[in-house]
Image: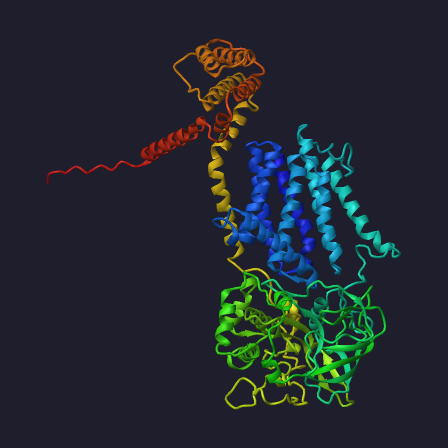
Amino acid sequence: MSGRARLALTAAAATLMASCALLPLVSPVTWLFQAAFLLAVQTGVGAAARRVPLARPLTVAAQALATLLMLTVVCAHSHAIAGVIPGPDTFRYLGDLLQQGSDDVSRYAIPAPLTPGIRLMVIGGVLVVGLVVDTLAVTFRSAAPAGLPLLALYSVAAGLSDGPTDWLWFLVAAAGYLMLLLAEGRDRLSQWGRVFGGAARTPGGQESGAVAPVRTGRRIGFAVLSLALFVPLVMPSIQGGLLDGAGTGVGVGDGNGGTISAVNPLVSLRDSLNMDEDRQVLSVRTSSDDVSDLYLRIVSLDDFDGTTWKPAQRHITGVPDKFPTPAGLGADVRRTTVTSSIAAADWYAQDWLPMPYPPSRVKVAGTWRYEPVGMTLVGDHGQSTRGETYLVTSLDVQPTAEQLAAAPEASAAMKKEYTKVPSSLPPVVAQTAKEVTAGSANHYEEAVKLQDYFAVTGGFQYDTQVEVGRGEGAIANFLKQKRGFCVHFSFAMAAMARTLGIPARVAVGFAPGTPQADGTVSVGLKDAHAWPELYFEGVGWTRFEPTPTRGTTPSYTVSQTPGSSVPDETLPSKGSSAAPSASASQSEGCTPQLRRQDACAGPSAAAAVQSGDGGPPWWQLALWALGGLAVLAVPLSPMLYRQRTRSVRLGAHDRTSSGMAARTLAVWLELTDTAWDFGILPDESQTPRNAAARIVRLGRLDPAAAASVHRVADAVEQVLYAPRPQPTAGLADDVRRVAAAFNGTVGVPARLRALFAPRSSVRAVWAASAGWARLRERVSAARPTLRKPSEQEG
């Protein structure tokens, strides 16, 4: 193996070793095998380009093009031309995936699921770093600066991870970089001759003489790694170092002062649900006689991009003394005032304040900010709910079915913001919504039929372990499989309501908890829930409950007439049973492993519909990528063949007399092939001198180039006719000078033809034909001859 090939393999290995620091951040770790395969292809393309050889910028461009093709096949094959060639739609889709990946990174706790957006960021980042490392260390032969991209890759992972094995990933990444430095040093030393190993040892075992540089480099590297690992251990005053195992920030505490904290409320909710036990989150004491409708709302998700629901970016203000009347709530709708005292556990730190909806007044200590559209409170400058006790005055809105049915159309602004669905939403979602709500007289009847379709008549089952697919087709898969948990039900109903022109959003918070003997209500981790809210003019945002066995069905949607799924609009709203939901706090027998996979009851809304479209297995995509590279290489093969042939003919040669003669003839052949590429056919019947004069005349070469042609011809005549030919120096430079002269005398089309479709590349076909003929002759010669036995007369 050549020194440069060894250096290329070491550069790829160093990139992979540094990328191992990302392993604790994303689960599952199958992305590493995909990245390793794609990185190997990228390294192979670079090695092939350097062997041709291509110029350094062209080598980097070839690797970048191969990287783009591989990412297109792996991440966006359905948006590419023929599944391989990227087009404008491909770049738009990749941009959307990157944005989605950025949102997923801020949404999920560590380890984050391998969504398509995160996969593109991780694998694409590793490939980009690998390209930079290969360019610096191998193409430009400067391994030391290649440590900067490796450091950047490791630093990103180290800044996000805070696990007990961080020191191991540092050791692996540092070892990869030291391997790269040693490989480059060995390659440089090999250019001076054999790597010396020092004098032999004396009988006493003591070394004498020089120590091998490679061995010395290994010892220095080991010493540096030892210092980097063990110095922080003996210097405890340095906080936040590599081995600091008691780091602060986002994490799960032990219940005695630890916190679950995150800027995004969905992240902290997800972390809470990953706890192994159903711990109490909130203790509520309320003035309401009926706690079955006591939903505690954290945040509303009103931005739907076809793959997931998320909170829209809103302007926040100071907390007002009295909140305004909720949007859309008319004066004729019955309402009662409810006062609730809520105490948060001292281990539970949530940036958003859980409250009944709609709140009208909040008394809470600390620095909080008010978001007026969702009527929510969010902590400012690190403020959280940890150990807080606060008082919330809210409205218990009690609309009748008649009021909801008679609600006029929402305003144009409301419908524009809350009924839009992306064009990527599968048509089956809107089609199913129309079929389910066929015959409805108004939006209210449509909403009730949607709720009953999911909760009663549609055959759906509540299942926390179901796989419903990913991305834009997730809702369609859920409608087909009819199994899921609260997030799937709420997401699907809200999306279907929007297709019917009903303003809709998704609320995330807690379902009604369990009444206690002391009159309080205990809200636990298993009460985490998501539900849809639909807007009706004159009533405002109204809760619906499509999830079977979870929460409570709103009284204004319960039918009072046997055989009818739509409530009697003439009857007033009646309170539901005061008994709590039987399954609101049920453990469901969920194991810790299932909770980490978000398969438990009531996970955060952000964990429900993951982005991406699944697609074929990665190895099949990798084969497609190789096929795409092969298809791309076919039209470029004549150019690559000529560049490789030119490099061999004009390259190094044996300095013996026979080697010099063979090299002179090869240079002459390269000269005639160069003239052939520019339209001057070779004439092997002429002597070298006459052939040179013909090339000069037809090519209209300048005097300097003409002299170079005749100098090569004279050298060939020396080899062919002189008894003791004398070597001629500078023949390769003469050929390059002639090629440059041809480029200056012809037009652009002829230059492009000579570069991309050289005529002399037909020699490859001739060589293949001759090789096939020789192979057939060998097979024929090796085949035994069967003779017919002679007949003997008896």
> Relative to 769, does residue 23 appear above or below in the rendering?
below
> Relative to 496, does residue 722 appear above or below in the rendering?
above
Query: Camera-side residue: 436 or 397?
Result: 397
Q: Is any atom of residue 344 visible in this view?
A: no
Residue 135, image x and y in percent? Answer: 65, 38
> Relative to 467, does residue 446 appear above or below in the rendering?
below
Residue 469, image x and y in percent? Answer: 55, 65
| Residue under the point 69% across and 46% down | 176
> Which quadrant: the N terminus?
top right
Residue 237, image x and y in percent? Answer: 89, 56
Q: Quadrant of residue 424?
A: bottom right
Chosen colour scheme? rainbow
| Residue under the point 40% across and 13% down | 686
Task: Specify the farthest residue to the left.
Answer: 794
Task: Specify the farthest residue to the right.
Answer: 237
Q: Is any atom of residue 717 visible in this view?
A: yes
Query: Camera-side residue: 280 or 783?
Result: 280
Residue 274, image x and y in percent? Answer: 69, 71
Query: Camera-side residue: 92 or 579?
Result: 92
Query: Camera-side residue: 749 or 361?
Result: 361
| Residue under the point 31% across and 34% down | 780
> Which quadrant: the C terminus?
top left
Q: Is residue 717 left or right of residue 207?
A: left
> Relative to 68, does residue 21 appear above or below in the rendering?
below
Q: Is residue 66 left or right of residue 721?
A: right
Q: Is residue 757 left or right of residue 102?
A: left
Q: Quadrant of residue 350?
A: bottom right
Q: How many numbered marks have been drawn onto this rendered protein structure?
A: 0
